[in-house]
Image: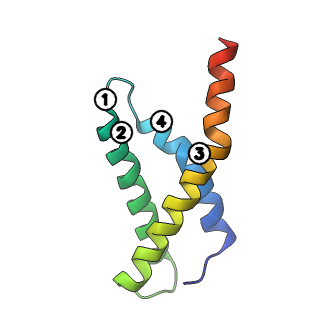
């Protein structure tokens, strides 16, 4: 699978999109499903818009890339930014 910088950048920003879609009143399990659906859609769109053939051998690694990079970006950056914002209030 060919990974370009745009995919990595989008994957790093996806946690912000997921945070906008999540709701405080929803159970954690439902919010996790929202996150998973966003990563699956992003990974699938990455394969569709690239020159790669649309099959499971390309879709699964793309979804894995978006999920892994998005989770790491959230844990390293976005989560800490939320905590700093909460403490400032």
Whole-angstrom CA distance, mark 4 to mark 2, is 11 Å
Residue 22, compared with residue 42, is above or below; it is above
Visible residue check, residue 47: yes
**What residue sits right under mark 3 in the picture?**
74
Q: Position of residue 44 (x, y in %)?
A: 41, 69
Tell me the residue at 48%/72% (across/down): 62
User: N-terminal of the two: label 1 or label 4?
Assistant: 4
Left or right: 84, with 74 as reference point: right
**What residue sits right under mark 2 in the picture?**
31
Circle 1 or circle 4, nearest the eye: 1
Secondary structure of the residue carrying numbered label 2: helix
Mark number displayed over residue 26: 1
Whole-angstrom CA distance, mark 1 to mark 4, is 13 Å
Q: Are marks 2 and 1 in contact (CB under 8 Å)?
A: yes
Left or right: 30, with 71 as reference point: left
Viewer-closest of 82 and 4: 82
Q: Position of residue 53 (x, y in %)?
A: 42, 88
Q: Position of residue 40 (x, y in %)?
A: 39, 62
Q: Position of residue 2 (x, y in %)?
A: 59, 83
């Amino acid at each position: 699978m060919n990974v370009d910088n745009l995919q990595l950048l989008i994957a790093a920003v996806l946690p912000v999109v997921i945070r906008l879609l999540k709701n405080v009143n929803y159970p954690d399990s439902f919010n996790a499903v929202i996150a998973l659906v966003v990563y699956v859609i992003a990974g699938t769109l990455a394969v569709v818009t690239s020159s790669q053939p649309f099959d499971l051998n390309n879709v699964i690694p793309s979804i894995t890339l978006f999920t892994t990079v998005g989770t790491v970006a959230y844990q390293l950056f976005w989560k800490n930014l939320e905590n700093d914002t909460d403490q400032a209030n």
